[in-house]
Image (spheres, rainbow, N blue to C red):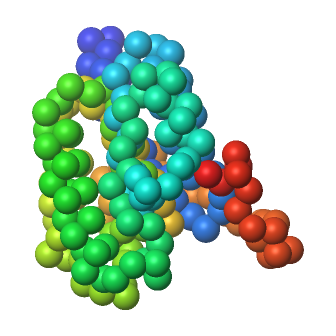
């Protein structure tokens, strides 16, 4: 019985941070820092954020030796559907390669839920939900996956070991305060 509990504790978990409230990426990045502190190898793939912009987490993670890669082109209204589709296609191919390589203990797929929730243009052929679910189920046994972003698909939440929903109660955006450097980016 004790051996069974130990084996279960060693298997990789799937954690989902979703909801309309702030803190999904922040929670995942805090988890990354904790994991590195325990000697885990961590990779962060950001699906929406663009490498053309500077983010506080990238600056910090580079100093800490945590691999973090922005694969997106920004908000859906900032570029053409074709640009977003190409970025998602490249990001998904890169993600599959990195996850199946198995060299990481923790892989964070930041804003993957947002990408899967895009309705302004078709993404099913470049980021198929079926492939995402397959990757979750067939990743290396020891690997923890953390998936963030609003509008998590029911299918992803169903195969997760933990789902946390961030609920917006009050936000300074509603007071006209824009994104704050060091808080949002």
User: In which quadrant of the rendered image does the N terminus lie?
Assistant: top left
Residue 150 seen anywhere in this rendered image of the structure: yes
Q: Residue 1 vs residue 35: left or right?
A: left
Residue at (25%, 56%) from the top-left corner? 91
The relative height of residue 50 versus residue 121 in the rendered view (above or below) is above
Along the line of sight, the residue nearer the viewer: 51 or 66: 51
- Residue at the outermost right position: 175
Q: Residue 166 vs residue 8: left or right?
A: right
Image coordinates for residue 116, horizontal then vertical, percent: 33, 70
Q: Quadrant of residue 87?
A: bottom left
Along the line of sight, the residue nearer the viewer: 22 or 76: 76
The relative height of residue 169 versus residue 101 in the rendered view (above or below) is below
The tally of labels here is 0
- Residue at the outermost front position: 52
Residue 29 seen anywhere in this rendered image of the structure: no
Residue at (49%, 31%) from the top-left corner? 61
Residue at (51%, 24%) from the top-left corner? 63
Q: Quadrant of residue 143?
A: top left
Along the line of sight, the residue nearer the viewer: 28 or 56: 56
Q: Residue 106 vs residue 23: left or right?
A: left
Residue at (19%, 65%) from the top-left corner? 89
- Residue at the outermost bottom position: 120
Image coordinates for residue 139, horizontal then vertical, percent: 18, 40
The relative height of residue 28 versus residue 16 in the rendered view (above or below) is above
Image coordinates for residue 169, horizontal then vertical, percent: 77, 66
């Amino acid at each position: 019985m004790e051996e069974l509990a130990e084996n279960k504790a060693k298997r990789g978990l799937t954690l989902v941070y979703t909801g309309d409230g702030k803190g999904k990426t922040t929670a995942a990045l805090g988890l990354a820092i904790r994991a590195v502190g325990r000697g885990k190898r961590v990779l962060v793939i950001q699906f929406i954020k663009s490498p053309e912009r500077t983010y506080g987490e990238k600056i910090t993670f580079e100093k800490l030796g945590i691999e973090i890669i922005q694969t997106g082109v920004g908000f859906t209204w900032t570029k053409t559907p074709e640009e977003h589709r190409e970025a998602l296609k490249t990001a998904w191919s890169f993600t599959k390669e990195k996850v199946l390589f198995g060299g990481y203990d923790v892989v964070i797929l930041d804003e993957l839920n947002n990408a899967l929730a895009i309705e302004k243009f078709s993404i099913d052929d470049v980021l198929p939900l079926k492939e995402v679910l397959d990757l979750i189920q067939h990743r290396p046994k020891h690997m923890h996956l953390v998936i963030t972003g609003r509008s998590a698909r029911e299918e992803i939440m169903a195969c997760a070991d933990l789902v946390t929903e961030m609920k917006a109660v009050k936000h300074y955006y509603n007071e006209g305060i824009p994104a704050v450097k060091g808080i949002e980016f």
